[in-house]
Amino acid sequence: MLEAFDLTGRIPKGQYSAIVEPLEARTAELQREVRKRGKSVIIVMEGWRGSGITRIINLLQPVLDPRGTRIHPIAEPNDIERDHGLFWRFWSRLPSYGQTAIFDRSWYTATIVERYTADAMDEIPASCIEDINNFESQIISDGNLILKFFLHISRDEQKRRLNVIKDSPFTMQARYLHRKEGIYMVNRDFHMIDRMLIKTDMPASPWTIIEAESMKYGYVRILQTFNSAVECWLIEKEGGKKEQTQTYLIKTISEPEESSILKKTDLTKSYTRPEYKPILQSLQEELRNLQVEIYKRNIPVVIVFEGWDAAGKGGCIIRLAESFNPRGYVVEPIGPPNDWEKMHHYLWRFYTRFPRKGYITIFDRSWYGRVLVERVEGFCSESEWQRAYHEINVMEDELTREGTILIKFWLHISKDEQLRRFHDRQNNPEKNWKITEEDWRNREKWDQYENAVNAMIRRTTTAQAPWTVIPANSKYYARISVLETVRNALQKRIKEMK
């Protein structure tokens, strides 16, 4: 790929200003239009050491409106970033809708420096390439634009530039890149970088190779590419063209097949109060000790609670939380997204809540709202919730491969039991606050929700992140089942690490 580029390109003498000024004016105009349209432009700057990434960004800065632009120089991760998966820090830096983000180095450099451990720099593993492509696909499928630039220079030009800037304290994010001695050196890494560019040159997020031996020529090429890509992108959005997501569109499964999972749940299981109390106390003591072991081993834990209205999620969470030291866990109650959260990809607000190593996060409702309430109530399009199954599986796969224990519960009750609990809440002054008109409206769509739940369980149950359906007509049985499942999952991981 890189071998095909001619590095001798130059701007004709005396013509630079006449060429660059109208391009800059158009770039500024397009950025303002992006802000109006409400989706993001993400610019990735990668290149050889000394290829001029900093100089290009400095040229772009006065052109782009600083109120709508954020530059992210990627260097050594801090302690909090080290306690999360590699892509967490990039999810947390994604711009809100209407904004432009420039990444000075990106997930490409982070992958090479932090995840690629081979001494021989021949080729990045396929799993790393897959993670990168999945990450970019999720951003693009939300309607955003990614522009990826690789600044290309020759071996001799690199040698000359590195000699000039060798004493600069900001050179090449020096300490970070030197974790892999020789990374982004033309003479050593040409094959590896070339293969990486080829394998991540996707139709929806292609690479633009910038011939950067002449900074003026390279800057003009970047402006031309930005203007052309953004213009086409805005035309597609104006025409209502669907996002490039058909690769992940899953065909709807028939109603009878979808409805079979929940109907198999035995809702007659129960405990009496005398049986329940001693089992609960024993389990809570076990979980208290297991939390200490999880903390010592730096294992993050994510526990997801979904279920019918009045299924008893709150009671289960309370009994589970009572088992843990409050300094080591947090409960995240998830409601409708606020205005700031709506300005991001729907998964963004969950990535920012994921726990550090050794800590536990309990989600009272979760990202599964995308394929449940948002699907049934029409808060997102069919293509969006269909796409979400793949997006969620990718996110959870990333979480578990980074070492997170992920436990997912669906609390299942019968329609009659829900009605009984609704009436109990409505007639009890101490519980009246728990019942709303929305609960009654949701109940009227029971069949639609049941179909959505079955589809969710079927399509997002994986070996590393299975669903556990909890029979919850008996609250005592549900609570014990939840605590037992969490205990077993923690014990299994600790045993595997010994």
Image: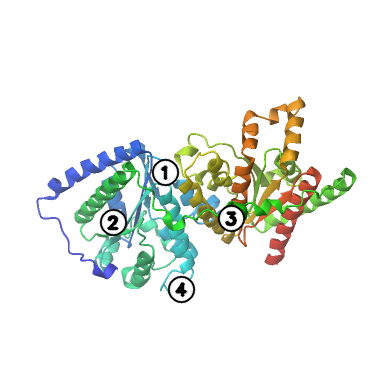
Looking at the picture, how far across and down is residue 101, in whole percent?
Answer: 37, 46
Rounded to the nearest angstrom, the CA distance separating label 3 from label 1 is: 28 Å
Type of amino acid at the residue the image marks with label 3: Thr
Q: Can you say whether 361 is above or below 498 in the image?
A: above
Looking at the picture, how far across and down is residue 456, in whole percent?
Answer: 59, 51
Task: Please identify the quarter of the rendering in which residue 240 is found.
Answer: top left
Front-most of residues 6 and 371? 371
Judging from the image, the colouring scheme is rainbow
- Residue that badge 3 annotates: 460
Helix, strand or loop at label 4? It is loop
Sequence-wise, which precedes: disc 1 or disc 2? 2
Q: Nearer the viewer, mark 3 or mark 4?
A: 3
Circles 4 and 1 in contact, beta carbons < 8 Å: no
Q: Nearer the viewer, mark 3 or mark 1?
A: 3
Q: Nearer the viewer, mark 2 or mark 3?
A: 3
- Residue that badge 1 annotates: 95
Residue 110 seen anywhere in this rendered image of the structure: no
Helix, strand or loop at label 3? It is helix
Helix, strand or loop at label 2? It is loop
- The single residue placed furthest to the right in the displayed view is 274
